[in-house]
């Protein structure tokens, strides 16, 4: 099957061109805090290493660890954008990340042996897949705004839908565990989150700045945290941002995804009107 990367790139390019044309027509920097409604959109690419520990809690199923893998090689499809609607110090912010990965490099950590779950020196060929959606929606308030930068406090929720799968072929002293097979699970998580975001000015003219964000959340049998730190530059038509981001989930024992962490660089283009 042909990967839809070219179609995705074309769609993103058309959207970016349309936003560029509409915003560039304004010809001046937008004051997001003038008391009127203003909007912002950031289209970005995030290129993380992926770490997962999968636990399929059915007799004989393995605990699988997904090692850092090649993002572009394993990526099937992705959509990523962030946005805000602001009036004065109040804003509604959102972020959407959708990824579809296949053939992630993996290894078996534990299998079911005759005496129970044990670590075994097995030779394994394991392919894992991950299809995930992360959607954040929050209200924020600008608590600090001065010549040095801004700081917003926020509260809202993050929704995660993760479909994980594993196919394995094992050799070695594997006890009662099946030497080959496959398994797939879907997890839906809703977490309330609190956090902060903003920017620190790095130059007198305000063109160079350091964006940041951090939040933590919790829900039923899990908790999550997200953090970003970057470098941005303002043009007349918008901003270019380079950042490093981490998004992590941890669940209690017996859940299909014991932990999941996505960590890596991010490159985005922002428009304001």
Image: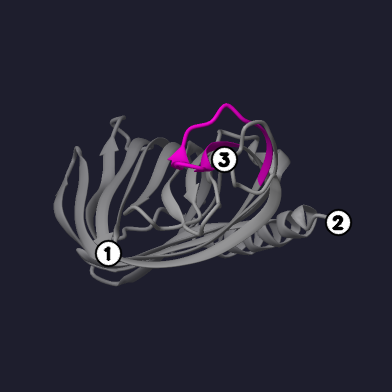
Relative to 68, residue 145 above or below: below
Give the mark toward the camera: 3 or 1: 1
- Label 2 – label 3 distance at C-alpha: 21 Å
Farthest residue in the left direction? 143
Q: Residue at x 60, y 47 (%)?
A: 177
Way the structure is coloured: one colour
Q: CA distance from mark 2 to mark 1?
A: 38 Å
Q: For the residues marked 3 and 1, what is the alpha-carbon distance in whole angstroms?
A: 27 Å
Residue 139 locus on image (x, y percent): 25, 68
Tell me what residue is drawn at x 67 percent, y 41 percent. Answer: 126
Q: Classify mark 2: residues with Cα within 10 Å, few (<14), some (14-19) or many (20+).
A: few
Q: Nearer the viewer, residue 153 or 51?
A: 51
Labels 2, 1: front one: 1
Marks 3/1 in contact by CB < 8 Å: the verdict is: no
Q: Quadrant of residue 47?
A: top right
Q: Is residue 263 left or right of residue 20?
A: left
User: In the rendering, which numbered label is found on residue 192?
Assistant: none
Left or right: 118 in relation to 199 = right
Q: Is residue 111 magenta?
A: yes
Q: Which residues are magenta?
A: 107-127
Q: Would you identify the image quadrant in which residue 149 lies?
A: top left
Q: Nearer the viewer, residue 194 or 150?
A: 194
* Residue at the image point whose x is 56% and y is 34% from the top: 67
**Pointers 2 and 1 in contact (C-beta within 8 Å):** no
Is residue 233 something one can see in this rendering? no
Location of mark 3 (residue): 47
Residue on which the image places disc 2: 2
Residue 81 lies in the magenta-colored region: no
Task: Please state, as top left, top right, bottom left or bottom right, where the N terminus lies in the image.
Answer: bottom right
Q: Earlier in the sequence, mark 3 or mark 1?
A: 3
């Amino acid at each position: 099957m042909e990967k839809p990367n070219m179609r995705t790139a074309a769609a993103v390019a058309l959207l970016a061109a349309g936003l560029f044309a509409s915003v560039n027509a304004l010809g001046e920097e937008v004051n997001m805090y003038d008391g009127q409604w203003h909007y912002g959109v950031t289209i970005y690419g995030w290129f993380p290493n992926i770490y997962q520990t999968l636990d399929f809690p059915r007799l004989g199923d393995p605990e699988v660890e997904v090692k850092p893998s090649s993002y572009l090689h394993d990526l099937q499809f992705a959509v990523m954008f962030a946005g805000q609607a602001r009036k004065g110090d109040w804003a509604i912010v959102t972020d959407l990340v959708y990824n579809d990965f296949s053939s992630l490099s993996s290894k078996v950590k534990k299998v079911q042996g005759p005496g129970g779950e044990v670590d075994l020196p097995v030779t394994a060929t394991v392919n894992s897949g991950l299809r995930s959606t992360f959607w954040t929606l929050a209200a924020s308030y600008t608590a600090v705004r001065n010549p040095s930068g801004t700081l917003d406090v926020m509260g809202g929720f993050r929704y995660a839908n993760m479909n994980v799968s594993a196919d394995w072929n094992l050799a070695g002293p594997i006890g009662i565990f099946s030497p080959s097979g496959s398994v797939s699970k879907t997890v839906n998580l809703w977490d309330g989150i609190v956090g902060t975001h903003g920017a620190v000015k790095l130059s007198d003219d305000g063109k160079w700045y350091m964006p940041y964000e951090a939040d933590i959340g919790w829900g039923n049998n899990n908790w999550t945290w997200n953090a970003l730190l970057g470098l941005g530059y303002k043009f007349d038509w918008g901003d270019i941002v380079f950042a490093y981001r981490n998004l992590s989930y941890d669940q209690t024992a017996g859940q299909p995804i014991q932990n999941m962490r996505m960590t890596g660089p991010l490159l985005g283009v922002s428009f304001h009107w």
